[in-house]
Amino acid sequence: MPLPFLTADRAFDEAADTALPFDDRDQWRRPYRPGPYRVGAAALMLLLASYVLFAAVIIAVAGDTTAASVCGVLAVLIIAAALRLLRMGAWVSARGLRQVSFFKTLTAPWDTVVATRTVQQPVRWLGLPRTVQGQALVLVRKDRRGEQTALLTSANGDFLGRTTAFDRAADSIEVWTEEYRPQR
């Protein structure tokens, strides 16, 4: 059975001689796989949603449709949160660079991007307030007066304990930047 969510890694493994191995570059894509912590958290949320849906069915059979609808809405919200958690990360296309967080999405067209580079700095551990020393891929935009935005960190849910995967993803995004950013 094919697993389409693994195509990003397969494309990079099969096309090691090209820096941008995708044919359709207008489509938004994440140039790395979601990490085990992010996938595990989403799986636990989906497990919780299945229990809440089962409770909604039992409550509906018992005859309380109002409570069953509340449980159903809660299950839908949990499922939506799990899917949004899986979509978080840095996405690239020929149109720009997109950072998807849990509550907002920021898109930087390539003509506003000055540079992307990897720097050593304190980074948030799994998105929590605690910081640890690590690497971050930062985006410098000209419309934000040189303000640096961290796109990826070596201590987030995608790359904690996977330094090789962080280096590969950062290199891939830097190659996309060099390919599509207007030369000055």
Image (tube, rainbow, N blue to C red):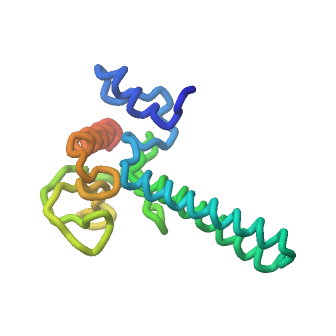
Q: Position of residue 13 (x, y in %)?
A: 34, 25
Q: Nearer the viewer, residue 178 or 70?
A: 70
Q: Quadrant of residue 139?
A: bottom left
Q: Nearer the viewer, residue 26 or 68?
A: 68
Q: Position of residue 136 (x, y in %)?
A: 22, 56
The residue at the point 47 percent across, 61 percent down is 105
Q: Is residue 165 among the parts visible in the rendering? A: yes
| Image side of residue 63 versus residue 154, left or right | right
The residue at the point 32 percent across, 36 percent down is 179
| Image side of residue 176 versus residue 131, left or right | right
Question: Where the N terminus falls, by quadrant?
Answer: top right
Q: Quadrant of residue 119?
A: bottom left
Q: Nearer the viewer, residue 12 or 144?
A: 12
| Image side of residue 11 versus residue 76, left or right | left
Question: Where the C terminus falls, by quadrant?
Answer: top left
Q: Nearer the viewer, residue 178 or 105?
A: 105
Q: Position of residue 18 (x, y in %)?
A: 32, 23
| Image side of residue 105 versus residue 172, left or right | right
**Relative height, residue 60 to residue 20 (above, below):** below
The residue at the point 74 percent across, 69 percent down is 56
Q: Is residue 182 among the parts visible in the rendering? A: no
Q: Position of residue 93 (x, y in %)?
A: 44, 42
The residue at the point 38 percent across, 51 percent down is 90
Circle count: 0
